[in-house]
Image (cartoon, rainbow, N blue to C red):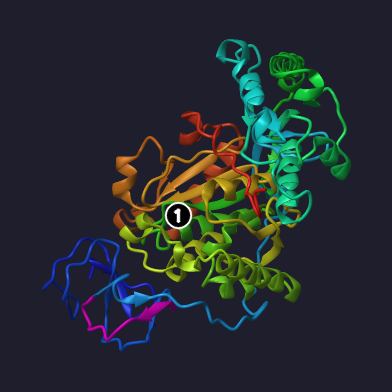
Amino acid sequence: MEHIIRLRALDNVVVANRALNAGDKVGDITLLDAIPAGHKIATSDITAGARILKYGQTIGYAMSDIACGKHLHTHNVEFRATDAEYQCGTNLQDVVRVPDQARDTFMGYRRENGSVGTRNYIAIVTSVNCSATAARRIADSFGEEELSKYPNVDGVVAFVHGTGCGMAGDGEGFEALQRVMWGYAKHPNHGGVVMVGLGCEMNQIDWLLDAYGLRQSPTFQTMNIQSVAGLQKTIEMGVKKVREMLPIVNAAQRTPCPASELKVALQCGGSDAWSGITANPALGEACDLLVAQGGTGVLAETPEIYGAEHLLTERAIDRATGDRLIGLINWWEDYTARNRGSMDNNPSPGNKKGGLTTILEKSLGAAAKGGTTPLTGVYKYAEPVRAQGFTFMDSPGYDPASVTGQIAGGCNVVCFTTGRGSAFGSKPAPTIKLSTNTAMYERMVDDMDINCGDIITGGATIQSKGREIYEMFLRIASGEASKSEAQGLGDYEFVPWQIGAVM
């Protein structure tokens, strides 16, 4: 029986723990097909149209009669839109809070406004794609030799993007971009900020300053290329502004801060069948430990909770919170329909090769990253996350766009699970990467921080691995470099979600 994994007693499928051959016998089942590792096997005869159950939940429907021992995948399992009946607050588990005086600590940067950073960058933030070159050249002017004089400064980073003009001056898209810019301008992992625009774009820097009450200071400066009189002069002025900031930003010191100041972005990418069995529930356990400390976990990727959202509304602290999540699901159903897509366009080819069949199956595994504690808040993309505990932020499933929104919302650490392998990293919040399976971990050991595959292969448990992940939160937050951070990832992963028409 070690060749298969049964997740719930109600399931009519099991998962192959390794590649199996037709004719193999597993328990009392004789396999009728070859089964790749991570793929599903029917454990009973399933009639056409019947529900396929994994995690005790519906992951799809039989396209035709399926015999016991058959391979279940995209060739015989179909997607149907979610039909769950939503209930709110029916599965609220008590959170045993760690007393304030007994809380764990990390070494963070306490900012003047009371927020806490885990890194100390100077950011060059662009309002529009037209100022991207200027921003990159300003940041590139500060190499290792000069920055070595400022050991408390983690770097000078350009956050550039492909929008900011050719868009409506109000509505969802404009508001989301302004929230992203505000979130990065005020992020606690930034000790200094220079905002660079062109001058005539739709996304005006002055409008942002007025809307969010931002004021220029020695560590917060703005400029437009047209007003400065050209690209080269803008670069020179930007370099001068950063050079003046460096000694001020370098003066910041790490001090002990409670774990309650951590906001962790809960992410997954390149998922496989093991994601929902190993790394995602282990990250959920770490999230529960963080919430007990008074900290915050932020789940996102709305298309990747589709089919599992009813499990989250059951954990909503009140009806309004649950209704906000349901409203996001309804918006995404409409969004994909009017763009002639399907919620089942996700999973990707790589996800399917790794054993995932429908978005319903993928979502049930992905939602496990959120642990078991009550859902305390539901937020728009890039909206400041103010509630403590387990929260949710609307975003696409596209990892760079999703993480950009979570960081803008205040996340100061990112934790990213992957089964197929990922080269993702982020700034200014460092990314911790978790491998779902041992084979991929060993193949990509330079990119993976923790192997969760040993939950299957090495005797680890969800609880022990969750504790290991949580303790890494504290170490990374205190300044230890994650694998992706050590490789310099994060300069090109800033991708604000572009909503609406390009004009």
Q: Is residue 195 above or below residue 234?
A: below
Where residue 382 sits: x, y (%)? 69, 50
Q: Which residues are magenta?
A: 57-70
As drawn, is 269 to the left or to the right of 335? Answer: left
Could you tell me if residue 263 is visible in this image? no
Where residue 257 sits: x, y (%)? 71, 39
Q: Is residue 340 above or below residue 230?
A: below
Where residue 391 sits: x, y (%)? 66, 60
As drawn, is 469 to the left or to the right of 248? Answer: left
**Outermost left residue:** 23
Residue at image position (42%, 75%) is 79
Residue at image position (47%, 58%) is 280
In the rendered structure, does residue 316 fall within the stretch colored magenta? no
For the image shown, how many numbered marks are present on the structure? 1
Quarter-of-image position of residue 455: bottom left
Q: Is residue 192 above or below residue 13?
A: above
As drawn, is 222 to the left or to the right of 39? Answer: right
Disc 1 crowd rating (10 Å Cα; few below 14, some 14-19, many 20+) is some
The one nearer the camera, 127 or 426, is 127
**Outermost front residue:** 503
Q: Secondary structure at mark 1?
A: helix
Could you tell me if residue 21 is visible in this image? yes
Quarter-of-image position of residue 430: top right
The one nearer the camera, 256 or 392, is 392
Where residue 306 sits: x, y (%)? 53, 69
Kind of residue indicated by mark 1: Ser
Which image quadrant: the N terminus? bottom left
Residue at image position (71%, 13%) is 236
The one nearer the camera, 76 or 258, is 76
Quarter-of-image position of residue 121: top right
As drawn, is 236 to the left or to the right of 469? Answer: right
Identify residue for label 1. 464
